[in-house]
Image: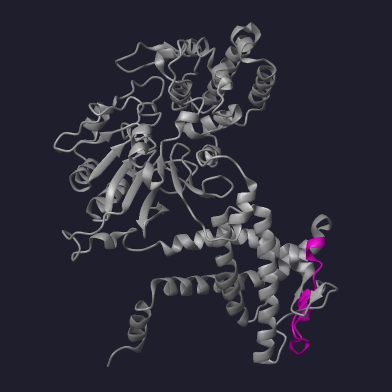
């Protein structure tokens, strides 16, 4: 006789995918939040005992008097230390319904419109108040009991209250993170995204190639355990590349910069060149997967970033395959895709520290960020060392003073003003000194870095010292302050945080007009331009609604060890019904 549970599960598997996922989330929300309600009683009693925040807990939440359960609020009978709570099993259904049918749709809609956080929180608050009241009356009709009610002066139709509205505002904002977390559970499958693209019956068949895949910030170096691209990352990347090699829907694979890394080496290490890195990884699953992509995907582009700015078609030669990586500039790639509404570049072009630097005072023809990276990589935590600079108050104050003084001069005065040139040189010295001081704290017993410390360079350049860096780049800040296309402060912070390049993506969509934002707020999203960057190491998906061209900015994140993203991410851009859609994928 067939097992009933197996037959029931078989029927469940036949349900539409979205229904199955929604059911899973419903149970997850219900189970976790019913536990939250048990904790709610203790949290409320603690909150009422703390005067500065007691106003948040003035609501009077009660249950049907016939249950005789309100004694729980009496701290003389049920002390806080007992951590005692209670909940009706009906709350499982209430919380599941509020989250799946109320907060989730609202969050997804608001996120697509780029609505500010405060207004999102207000809407969540009203959704919870409305659904709380509605479901309270529904349960009253079904059971004949008040599963809960409010007895305070702010009570609304008995089953909700203005007194608890601030709490629902906070809970609504917290729910955004919970929804993101649960969305990631939906992605836990035995197969990766899009594996159905090459099931046995589809391999070798012709399908429309509608998918462009973007990967960036992999930072492949020597592969030692201390490297940011080591341990599990090479194997994960090999799997992802092999997946796309066999996906018959992929028309382009775009390696969007910082793939082979010539920067991330300590001061006492000779950096590997790109050909040397390719040779080192030649007999690995990673390189086998990349070769498979070259064989099976129609176009595989390589757009250099800052850590691989020396990349050329010749230096990217991979032995054993006829077709090679097509090394193109951002301008060349975007010219090919101009009619599609797709724009891509690494993002370092507007980064003061990491943009290509051809000035005479640039050391070895490299940007200042190269040497900052070399110093930071002389420690075990280069990301933390580099991030520390953005938090230094003395540096922020000096940059502000420089900007104020430069702003008081016209272009001709800037070129001739010795005091301004002196301030620019002092800024470079200050940045290097701050970086060296913090790096020395992280050197863990290794010799301290000083001005005399030699930085080993590649075969094309002579070795330099840290003192040489401080004597160079004197015109750097003046040159960037003079630029009209890039805001000075934003160019300094381009790689400093998750949203460091948001302004640049916005600027590529035309002039600003807030009237457009409000006119588009209630309309279905119309995206005419998709902008893809890397560089920040943070995956981002943000709709641009207040510009002349409605756009979508997506950032690939990274595929290496970093404190910013918890797992490898990349971007897929898919053509559907003549329109482009972008998706952030996560390993």
Comparing 88 with 140, the one in front is 140
- The image position of residue 492, as x and y in percent, is 56, 28
Compared with 264, 471 (above or below) is above
Compared with 44, 245 (above or below) is above
Q: Quadrant of residue 102?
A: bottom right
Residue that lies at the very extreme toward the right in this rendered image: 153
- The quarter of the image holding the N terminus is bottom left
The residues colored magenta run 55-73
Picture residue at 67% right of the left edge, 15% below the top: 409
Is residue 92 found left or right of 576 in the rendered image? right
Is residue 556 among what the camera can see?
Answer: no
* 543 falls in the magenta region: no
Q: Quadrant of residue 52?
A: bottom right
Colour mode?
one colour
Compared with 344, 185 (above or below) is below
Compared with 526, 358 (above or below) is above
- The image position of residue 487, as x and y in percent, is 58, 29
- The image position of residue 401, as x and y in percent, is 69, 20
* 61 falls in the magenta region: yes
Picture residue at 39% right of the left edge, 75% below the top: 16
Comparing 511 with 301, the one in front is 511
Picture residue at 78% right of the left edge, 80% below the top: 158
- The image position of residue 243, as x and y in percent, is 27, 53
Is residue 398 among what the camera can see?
Answer: yes
Is residue 32 found left or right of 332 in the rendered image? right
């Amino acid at each position: 006789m067939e097992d009933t549970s197996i037959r029931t599960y078989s029927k469940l598997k036949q349900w539409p995918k979205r229904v199955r996922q929604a059911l899973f989330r419903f149970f997850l929300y219900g189970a976790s939040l019913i536990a939250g309600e048990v904790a709610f009683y203790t949290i409320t009693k603690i909150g009422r005992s703390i005067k500065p925040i007691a106003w948040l807990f003035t609501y009077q939440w009660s249950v049907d008097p016939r249950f005789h359960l309100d004694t729980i609020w009496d701290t003389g009978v049920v002390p806080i230390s007992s951590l005692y709570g209670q909940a009706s099993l009906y709350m499982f259904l209430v919380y599941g319904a509020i989250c799946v049918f109320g907060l989730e749709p609202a969050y997804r809609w608001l996120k697509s419109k780029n609505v500010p956080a405060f207004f999102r929180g207000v809407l969540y608050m009203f959704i919870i108040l409305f659904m709380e009241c509605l479901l309270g009356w529904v349960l009253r009709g079904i059971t004949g009991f008040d599963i809960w009610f409010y007895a305070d002066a702010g009570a609304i139709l008995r089953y909700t209250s203005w007194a608890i509205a601030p709490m629902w505002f906070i809970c609504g904002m917290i729910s955004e993170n919970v929804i993101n977390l649960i969305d990631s559970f939906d992605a836990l499958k035995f197969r990766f995204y899009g594996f159905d693209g090459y099931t046995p019956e589809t391999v070798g068949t012709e399908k429309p190639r509608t998918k462009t895949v973007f990967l960036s910030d992999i930072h492949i170096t020597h592969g030692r355990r201390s490297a940011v691209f080591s341990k599990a990352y090479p194997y994960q990347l090999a799997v992802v590349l092999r997946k796309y090699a066999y996906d018959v829907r992929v028309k382009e694979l775009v390696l969007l910069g910082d793939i082979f890394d010539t920067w991330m080496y300590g001061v006492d290490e000779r950096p590997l060149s790109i050909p040397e890195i390719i040779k080192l990884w030649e007999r690995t699953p990673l390189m086998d997967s990349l070769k498979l992509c070259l064989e099976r995907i129609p176009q595989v582009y390589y757009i250099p970033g800052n850590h691989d700015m020396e990349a050329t078609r010749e230096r990217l030669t991979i032995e054993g395959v006829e077709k090679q990586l097509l090394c193109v500039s951002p301008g060349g790639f975007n010219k090919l895709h101009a009619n599609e509404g797709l724009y891509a570049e690494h993002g370092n072009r507007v980064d003061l520290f990491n943009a290509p630097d051809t000035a005479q005072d640039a050391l070895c023809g490299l940007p200042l960020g190269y040497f900052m990276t070399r110093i930071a990589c002389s420690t075990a935590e280069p990301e933390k060392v580099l991030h520390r600079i953005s938090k230094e108050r003395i540096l922020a104050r000096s940059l502000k003073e420089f900007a104020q003084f430069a702003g008081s001069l016209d272009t001709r005065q800037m070129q001739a003003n010795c005091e301004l040139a002196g301030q620019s040189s002092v800024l470079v010295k200050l940045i290097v000194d701050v970086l060296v001081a913090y790096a020395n704290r992280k050197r863990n017993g290794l010799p301290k870095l000083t001005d005399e410390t030699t930085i080993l360079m590649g075969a094309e350049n002579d070795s330099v010292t840290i003192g040489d860096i401080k004597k160079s780049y004197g015109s750097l800040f003046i040159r960037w302050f003079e630029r009209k296309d890039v805001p000075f402060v934003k160019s300094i912070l381009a790689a400093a945080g998750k949203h460091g390049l948001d302004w640049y993506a916005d600027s590529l969509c035309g002039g600003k007009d807030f009237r457009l934002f409000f006119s588009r707020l209630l309309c279905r999203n119309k995206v005419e331009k998709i902008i893809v960057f890397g560089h920040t190491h943070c995956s981002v998906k943000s709709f641009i609604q207040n510009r002349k061209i409605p756009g979508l900015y997506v950032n690939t994140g990274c595929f290496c060890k970093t404190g910013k993203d918890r797992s490898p991410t990349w971007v897929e851009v898919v053509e559907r019904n003549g329109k482009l859609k972008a998706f952030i994928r996560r390993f």
